[in-house]
Image (cartoon, rainbow, N blue to C red):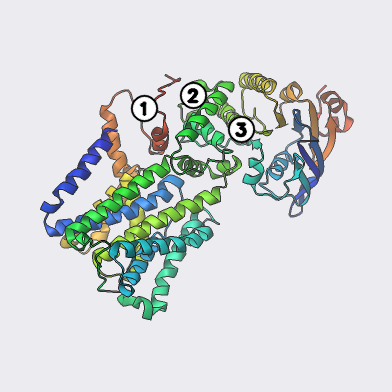
Amino acid sequence: MPLLECRGVSRRFGGLTAIDSVDLAVEPGEVRALIGPNGAGKSTLFNVITGVLPPTDGQIFFDGARITGLPVHRIIQQGVARTFQLTHLFPALTARENVRIAAQARRSDRWRPIAGGRVFAATRRIADQALEQLRLSAFADTRAGMLSHGNQRLLEIAMAVAQEPRLLLLDEPTQGLSVEETEQAIGILRDMLAKGNLTVILVEHDMEVVFGLADKIVVLHRGRVIANGPPADVKANEEVQRAYLGGLQ
Amino acid sequence: MRGRIVLAAVVALICASAPLLPPFTLTLLTEGLIFGLFAMSLDLMVGYTRLYSFGHAAAYGLGAYSTALILIHFDWPLPIGMLAGVAISTLIAIPIAWLCTRSTGVSFAMLTLAFAQLGYAMLYRFKEFTGGSDGIGGIPRPAGPFGLDFFQGKLGYFYVVMFCLLASFALCSVLVTSPFGAVLAGIRENEAKTRALGYNTRAYKIAVVVVAYALGSLAGALYTAFAGFVAPELFFWLVSGRVLIMVVVGGAGTLIGPIIGGVFFVVLEHQLSEVTELWPLAFGAIFIAFVMLAPEGIWGLLSRLEKSDARDRKPDFRDQTFDKNIRNPTSGNHAAS
């Protein structure tokens, strides 16, 4: 059974159809890349999956259960984590506290107004592990707003990891990174994927990242799925060549 | 830390010297502490959750009027009457919080203002019950339970106010350093991200607004028995504006700062109003000066002074207060250094 399944999902904004009857099934443990030109509907699809925008049409299933139309926090609580295309952090809090709040999010005692010692101790441990995994331990006590752009991108991934999700949605993790930073980020991501049994949907423009990490690739163009399959097949697909990959060999 | 010890010493000193103070000073101090409690309750919303309320007078007025009506119409002892007043106000605060948190930012501020003005208008609409523009006078401080009557005197009442303030402060301190408080900090910093992490941010906001209203109504209830009368002005938007200024000038997001701000402004007002009728002008000037020169407020300034002579410390930002408080003292692992 797929972990995430979209059946005929559409989202319209007035006259504009941002995503158009998308069918997508992601199996547990796979890394699926989602590519396509700007405005293809990639981020919109993330917003629809996580409940930020309800779909105009179609159904979404997570682990077999229908999640269409549920509020954001209910969908996330089932084990979905996401990062944003534009970095979303808690700038005045330390890097560790950013990740710790993420680690607290799925605990049943996350709301405790008193006697939170145990919550803090346990989530701190998870936070420090996640920071180490993303090689950010040196910056644990630095305020998130003071980190470099590259480290902010990694911090947001650390937060997603600390949520211990079953499905991880990464929206352009290497966006705005230098060549060296991108290389480093790919290494870190690869280690992370090798370790955990994570299911990932990855939006990315950098084809090196995509072909380096993904098991399968979905290509969106003007809101429609125009190709879906292993990297080699997608690369060879004529329509994809025309719509997106252009000069790529 | 040293600041807190000094503060505890100051509180102990005030409590010990209260019997020796001239009656008028004691009255002024009591009123200042009531306003300090009121401002601190607003700080939960403004400083810790970045929910700007422009209608916190609603909490004050609700507490004051419900306590006044209970004390007038029932022969209940003062503490029980006040608790009942706070309980009623808290219940009324729940639907208000539910409605106001449907919106954010400026519309949130306007909605809170609308509810305060609604309360103000209702006092005139239900004249027979509320006394209209005359308000309600001659509110007693009934003795009991168990024969307690020390609070009927000026000094005893001062201690009641001080006790309520300290208990509320302890409650707020625990709240903002708890896991719940960490989520509030998340909402303050980036609400969309907090929601994307799986927190039902609306529920947290409703909870913090209700707690803020409950403590604000306690301040109102204390005012009722302090002044012996209530008037519609308690609901007026000027009160909301004043308490917001007290929070900002005292130091938002510090709990202690707004208490100091409350006492500071009450004392200042009494001193200035003896000299000139234009005392609100001074209010405005002080507010502008603080916003421009010391946006971290009185308490922030004091902490900065303390920090400047303690070497080897990072610059303190008021938004970091939260982190500092929850940092585990046993594991001084500063990987960065």
* Label 3 – label 1 distance at C-alpha: 29 Å
- Label 3, residues with CA under 10 Å away: few <14, some 14-19, many ≥20: many
Asked whether residue A204 appears in the rendered view, the answer is no
Report the residue marked by disc 1: B314
C-beta proximity under 8 Å, tags 2 and 1: no
Q: Is residue B332 above or below residue B49?
A: above
- Mark 3 lies on a secondary structure that is helix
* Label 3 – label 2 distance at C-alpha: 17 Å
Count of picture labels = 3
Check the image and name the residue furthest to the front.
Answer: B146
Front-lying residue, B197 or A231:
B197
Disc number for residue A160: 3
Q: Identify the amino acid type marked 2.
A: Phe
Report the residue marked by disc 2: A139
Query: In the image, are marks 2 and 1 on the same chain?
Result: no
* Label 2 – label 1 distance at C-alpha: 14 Å
Quadrant into which the C terminus of chain B falls? top left
Residue B234 falls left or right of residue A45:
left
Q: Nearer the viewer, mark 3 or mark 2?
A: 3
- Label 2, residues with CA under 10 Å away: few <14, some 14-19, many ≥20: many
C-beta proximity under 8 Å, tags 3 and 2: no
* Quarter of the rendering containing residue B66: bottom left
Q: Is residue B101 above or below residue A66?
A: below
Q: Identify the amino acid type marked 3.
A: Ala
The structure residue drawn at horizontal position 63% and vertical position 41%, both measured from the top left corner, is: A77
